[in-house]
Image (cartoon, helix red, strand yellow):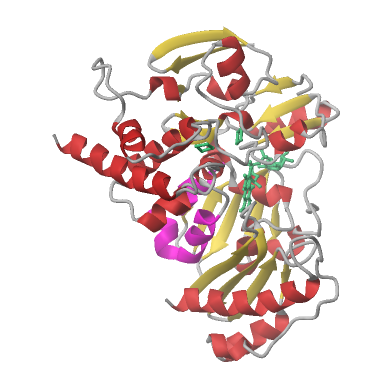
Amino acid sequence: MQISFTLNGRPTTVDVEPATLVAELLREQLNLTGTHIGCDTSQCGACVVHLNGLPVKSCTLLAPALDGATLLTIEGLQGAPGSNQMHPMQEAFREHHGLQCGFCTPGMLMTAVALATEKPNLTEAEVRHGLEGNICRCTGYQNIVISVMAGAAAMNAAKGE
Amino acid sequence: MKPFAYHQPDQIPDAAKLLTSIEDSKLVAGGMTLIPTIKQRLASPVALVDLSKLGSLKGIIDDGASITIGAMTPHAVVAASKLVQTKIPGLAALALMIGDPAVRSRGTIGGSVANNDPAADYPAGVLGLGATIVTSTREIAADKFFLGLFETALEPGEIITAIRFPVPLKAGYSKFKAPASRYALVGVFVAKFADGVRVAVTGAGPGVFRVPPMEAALSENFDPSAIAAIKIDNDGLTSDIHAEADYRAHLVTVMAKRAVDAALS
Ligand SMILES: Cc1cc2nc3c(=O)[nH]c(=O)nc-3n(C[C@H](O)[C@H](O)[C@H](O)COP(=O)(O)OP(=O)(O)OC[C@H]3O[C@@H](n4cnc5c(N)ncnc54)[C@H](O)[C@@H]3O)c2cc1C
Ligand code: FES
Ligand code: FES
């Protein structure tokens, strides 16, 4: 079947089998390999992308759900449009050592940005609750939580400017 | 995944017809249970009938003495709904405890109730509040809907369109999460109405069930102390790698007390 959607701001049309997972479509057909597949069983969150602004696990999303929708992947995350800068959440992860091997990071960032967008003044407890679906095998989460709090504050500040 | 055909009807009768006319077809709502099941080859439907284009299945309506939640309403929308937060805060709190943000973006109340997972949260809320399951053909009382392990009163081709919840005087939910899956090891929903209290338990056994002795005690005195000494029988409760039946029975009392506390706060 043919589906049309907006991918990281660009109109995109692809031919897919209905039984295609969005994670597969992104990685294998569209060469966007920033979205990772950690578990393929809906548990780890390495594959999180934004569908119409909401965080979803792309390993548990069928391609037909994209038709007419807006999809944002880690490749589309950026600072001020056209600036070629990193997103404030990415900056915060770099600044606060929110990653070690980096495998979970694309999913962590997408979940974190969705959390901070939904609720501007996040408490630490809310960040930990919000990250329950994202598993990290390296960091022990401490610096990820610190990064998300800092990134959320930076996103807030940028909004105020 | 094995290939399957994909249908996106925009009328409920069309969806029902597809479902009954295509052998081995299945409804898909949020897909948060169905897609993992297909991936594990525990199901191999030849066709999926997607409910997402049925606009009438979405949204939350205030009916005064009750609220009606469309079957395709995602958990995140119920959790964030000002209407649900105001009228049945215990139900909004339950929705916010399901899975994680990505699961709550996609997973729907209709899918959860139709699936009747023995550790799912919504069945406790639906039974605890004595809700009504509205389908494409009829209305079913919660007390007659849940028939045990993944089994419900739904007939082949029958589609849940909405769940109607009576507004209680007070209600609360408390669950002991299985740490890895976040499903309920034991979850208890307590609701107080003018004519008595209902207590529904999920996670502890093969299906959601009520606890009449706790209901009687709480109807007399709606306070955690009223049920502190009531321990339910281990018989028929689940024992698995996560917990023994005895521990689950113990947790039912603990979670019920906390649910009453939550309802009172
Ligand atoms: C990582 C993870 C964690 C989770 N944690 C929890 C948790 O803590 N608590 C909890 O309760 N759940 C949890 N879930 C399950 C989640 O809530 C699912 O969303 C829900 O059980 C199914 O809803 P769905 O909309 O995704 O249904 P689907 O997966 O699309 O469908 C499930 C079944 O219901 C049928 N169906 C769907 N809609 C209807 C309808 N309207 N009428 C008739 N039949 C229908 C389908 O044919 C299918 O058989 C979790 C899931 C995941 C992946
Ligand atoms: S790869 Fe999707 S949740 Fe792990
Ligand atoms: S940084 Fe390695 S898995 Fe998170």
Q: Position of residue B5 (x, y in %)?
A: 74, 19
- Quadrant location of the N terminus of chain B in the rendered image: top right
Q: Is residue B260 above or below residue B201?
A: below
Q: Quadrant of residue B156?
A: top right
Rendered residue at 43%/33% (across/down): A110
Rendered residue at 68%/37% (across/down): A41
Q: Is residue A41 above or below residue B251?
A: above
Could you tell whether B154 is left or right of B122 in the image? right
Tell me the magenta residue range: B72-97
Whether residue B56 is visible to the viewer of this picture, yes or no, is yes
Q: Is residue B79 magenta?
A: yes
Rendered residue at 67%/75% (across/down): B252
Farthest-out residue, left: A161
Q: Is residue B123 magenta?
A: no
Q: Is residue B41 above or below residue A71?
A: below
Q: Nearer the viewer, residue A107 or A101?
A: A101
